[in-house]
Image (cartoon, coloured by chain):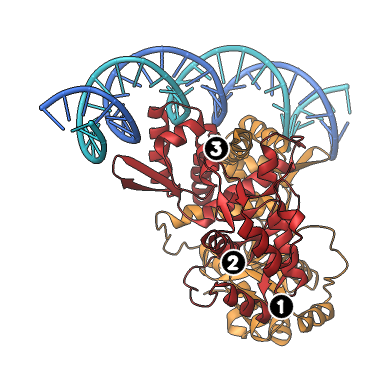
Chain colours: A orange, B red, C blue, D cyan
DNA sequence: GCCACGCTTCGGTCATGGCCGAAGCATCGG
DNA sequence: CCGATGCTTCGGCCATGACCGAAGCGTGGC
């Protein structure tokens, strides 16, 4: 008989994710922002009391972190590892029935640019990844990736210090299957830093109540000049 | 409101995994071998009819594949992607409460060498990974990995052809957190090929009804000569 | 042909847990 | 201090689904 304890612990976590309301909550938190309990209740599609119970269980199961702030309670995913699991489950589910939602109206903005937990996804993220690869700054092989020496210098110049924080076991350069593009985009610590830095520089802005991202004027210039992305790629869908 | 359909599909898969009996089944299948329904019933700790129902749902959910063979039905994991998810869920669960089972009696053999779905895990797998890294045959950075040109030549000589099957999107060289060693070992396509080739060469043997592996005499010589692993590393625990 | 074996289908029982409304605490604003 | 807001706890309802035993269908062996 194999060790059943492991099976049990797997089941506990999976059961936590395996409820529609809870997975809606988690999915909403994949946007990367911390959200309040009431916002999450809205996303989950259930009442406030029910949501409260779900959130308590998620926090207890270490999938979600809670932070009090005045009379609000902010919730966010506990770690990038959680986001990776959710992403993996999503891909697994997508592999089954070919559920290809044609082209939603507001999906357009999402397909163009959005956050994927803590990094960028969508058309521009895929273009960015391609460009970095072509220039030899990163090497992508299957789903793994490495930053080249040229790459390290380049990212240092862009304001991303890759050396100084090796404290986490989180992959530096990971790729993530883009559901809209069916191509790989950049994730991991590098992907997160790129998004953070792009926001700092005012190149992209998050759109309220959505995971979609907006590329600013400065961003159009910046992404074109620094990363060599065609500017028509950067304009919002019409 | 965010797209709730994605949350739902995540929930469906997670709920499938999130039952104790089913996750015991999946955990047993992580050994990499195809098992019969009755064997799985034993692993799951439930009756045959109940197991049958669970298996039907797992097959329906595309997590498990079934193959008839005479009056037996053999089940196995549908893809390495499924194994990766299970492994991820296990790590996530382990991260919570520090459940460090001291040293089981039969755990000893498992800690020494075992299969982790389709590749090796345990002390010798970690040693193997270290050795390959030291010799510059692979480069591991965080959790991603690359095979160097030297590495490609080396593996070709060992009988592993890395070039000819780029048909799957499966990572070539992936690492996987070893629960017993708390270190990384080699997974992905390369890890799978290494195990397969080692079995072909008669270096390791699977132990009946277990995920544990036994290193043969030929294996002691082979691993030492080819990979430079200290032979005391290869002897079974006393 | 028969029985043994492996697995599935059926019918019925039972517990888990998701859900809500009402009420209870906090915190903030006036 | 009082009401409004945000969130949680409580009690009770109800559906889902996990489980087993008995019986049904294949397949293989004698």
Q: Viewer-nearest of labels 3 and 1?
A: 3
Residue A206 lies, with reference to residue B159, above or below; the image says above
Residue at mark 3? B18
Q: Position of residue D23 (x, y in %)?
A: 23, 19
B198 sits left or right of A56 in the view: left
Residue at screen point 43% across, 59% down: A101
Q: Position of residue D20 (x, y in %)?
A: 42, 19
Residue at mark 1? A219
Residue at mark 2? B190
Quarter holding the N terminus of chain A?
A: top right
The mark that comes first in sequence, 3 or 2, is 3
Q: Position of residue A123 (x, y in %)?
A: 57, 73
> Looking at the picture, do discs 3 and 1 lie on one chain?
no
Chain for mark 1?
Answer: A
Label 3 SS: loop
Q: Quadrant of residue A87?
A: bottom right
D7 sits left or right of A141 in the view: right
């Amino acid at each position: 008989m194999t060790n059943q304890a492991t099976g049990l612990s797997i089941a506990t976590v999976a059961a936590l994710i395996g409820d529609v309301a809870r997975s809606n909550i988690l999915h909403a938190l994949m946007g990367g922002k911390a959200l309040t309990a009431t916002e999450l209740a809205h996303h989950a599609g259930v009442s406030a009391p029910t949501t409260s119970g779900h959130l308590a269980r998620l926090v207890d199961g270490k999938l979600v972190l809670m932070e009090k702030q005045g009379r609000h309670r902010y919730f966010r995913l506990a770690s990038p590892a959680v986001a990776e699991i959710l992403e993996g489950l999503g891909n697994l589910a997508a592999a089954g029935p070919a559920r290809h939602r044609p082209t939603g109206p507001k999906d357009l903005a999402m397909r163009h640019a959005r956050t994927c937990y803590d990094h960028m996804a969508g058309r521009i993220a895929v273009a960015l990844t391609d460009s970095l690869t072509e220039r030899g700054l990163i090497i992508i092989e299957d789903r793994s990736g490495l930053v080249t020496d040229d790459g390290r210098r380049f990212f240092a110049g862009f304001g991303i210090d890759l050396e100084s924080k090796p404290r986490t076991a989180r992959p530096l350069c990971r790729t993530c299957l883009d559901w809209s593009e069916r191509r790989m985009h950049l994730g991991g610590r590098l992907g997160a830093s790129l998004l953070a830095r792009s926001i700092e520089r005012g190149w992209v802005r998050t759109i309220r109540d959505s995971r979609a991202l907006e590329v600013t004027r400065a961003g159009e210039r910046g992404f074109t000049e620094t990363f060599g992305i065609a500017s028509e790629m950067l304009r919002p869908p019409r």
